[in-house]
């Protein structure tokens, strides 16, 4: 039994049909050599998975489906919802997640989720701008627990958390550089996020308030490296100038 999801033009809700027809498989996804991903995730997705425990977890931009399969196979979640807005990754998710308790939906971001349906959500491997767009599009559908992994513009995601009442409860860097920052948020009742208390807010938005508070030796090295790199240039764009000024205030 397959499940098909369609969007209407006007309000963009999903309509849910069930059919006995097998969905067409493309050659690209007919053979998937992903046995390894059952026993091992890469560092980035592993760091994401370690932060997820939920009854129903939704993953927007599920693509290969490895994250949800890992969470379901280890019973870290009871039910999964995979959301993809492109046909091929949607079919890839369907194929990898077949046989698990998971709905795979073709939809744009949270338009693929009903109100209150999931208690936890991940969005990984996209730019911060796209992540914020997805979260801001339908704020009432954003679950209470979030794990977000923006590939760039991480400060935009932290700023979203600050203005939307989601507190940062954990963050980490899953690789050698800044590109794999994993942010864990929880919906809060108080407006001020204690993570930023006592910190230079602009620097904290860029480099992470909890990372700055921990200030591990690798963080100091990363900041020194970035300062040395940026100092080579006579002229910097606004974003790099802001980063360099923030690094100079931190170090
Ligand atoms: C680079 S992949 C990341 C896949 C996986 N989340 C990971 O981190 O390994 C990003 C995926 O997000 C999907 N995507 C981008 N924007 C989306 C949106 N608005 N709604 C649903 N999926 C989206 C893309 O089709 C793509 O498959």
Image (cartoon, rainbow, N blue to C red):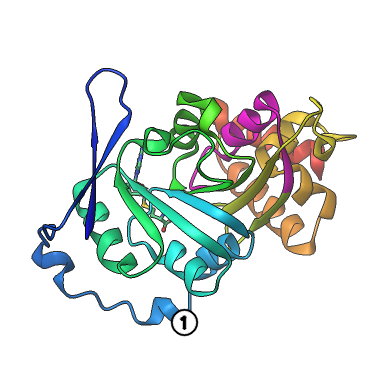
* 226 or 170, nearer to the observer: 170
- Residue extending farthest to the top is 10
Residue pointed to by mark 1? 39
**Left or right: 203 with respect to 97?**
right
As drawn, 109 above or below 28: above
As drawn, 26 above or below 34: above
* 45 or 80, nearer to the observer: 80
| Segment colored magenta | 148-169
Q: Quadrant of the N terminus?
A: bottom left
* 175 or 165, nearer to the observer: 165
Q: Is 206 a magenta residue?
A: no
x 59%, y 46%: residue: 119
The percent position of residue 223, horizontal first and vertical second, equals 70, 51
The percent position of residue 190, horizontal first and vertical second, equals 82, 28
> Residue 221: in sight, yes or no?
yes
* 67 or 17, nearer to the observer: 17
């Amino acid at each position: 039994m397959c499940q098909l999801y369609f969007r209407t033009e006007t309000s963009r809700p999903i309509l849910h049909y069930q059919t006995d027809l097998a969905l067409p498989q493309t050659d690209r996804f007919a053979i998937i050599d992903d046995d390894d991903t059952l026993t091992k995730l890469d560092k980035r997705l592993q760091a994401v998975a370690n932060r997820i425990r939920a009854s129903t977890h939704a993953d927007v931009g599920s693509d290969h489906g490895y994250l949800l399969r890992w969470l379901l196979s280890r019973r870290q979640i009871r039910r999964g919802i995979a959301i993809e807005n492109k046909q091929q990754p949607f079919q890839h998710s369907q194929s990898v997640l077949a046989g698990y308790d998971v709905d795979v939906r073709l939809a744009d971001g949270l338009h693929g989720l009903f109100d209150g349906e999931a208690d936890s959500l991940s969005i990984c491997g996209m730019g911060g701008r796209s992540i914020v767009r997805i979260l801001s599009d339908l704020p009432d559908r954003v679950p209470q627990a979030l794990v977000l992994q923006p590939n760039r513009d991480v400060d935009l995601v932290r700023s979203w958390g600050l203005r939307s009442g989601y507190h940062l409860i954990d963050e980490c860097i899953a690789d050698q550089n800044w590109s794999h920052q994993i942010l864990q948020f929880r919906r809060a009742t108080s407006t001020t996020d204690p993570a930023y208390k006592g910190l230079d807010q602009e620097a904290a938005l860029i480099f992470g308030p909890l990372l700055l508070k921990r200030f591990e030796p690798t963080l100091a090295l990363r900041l020194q490296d970035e300062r040395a790199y940026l100092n080579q240039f006579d002229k910097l764009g606004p974003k790099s100038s802001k980063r360099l000024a923030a690094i100079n205030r931190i170090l």
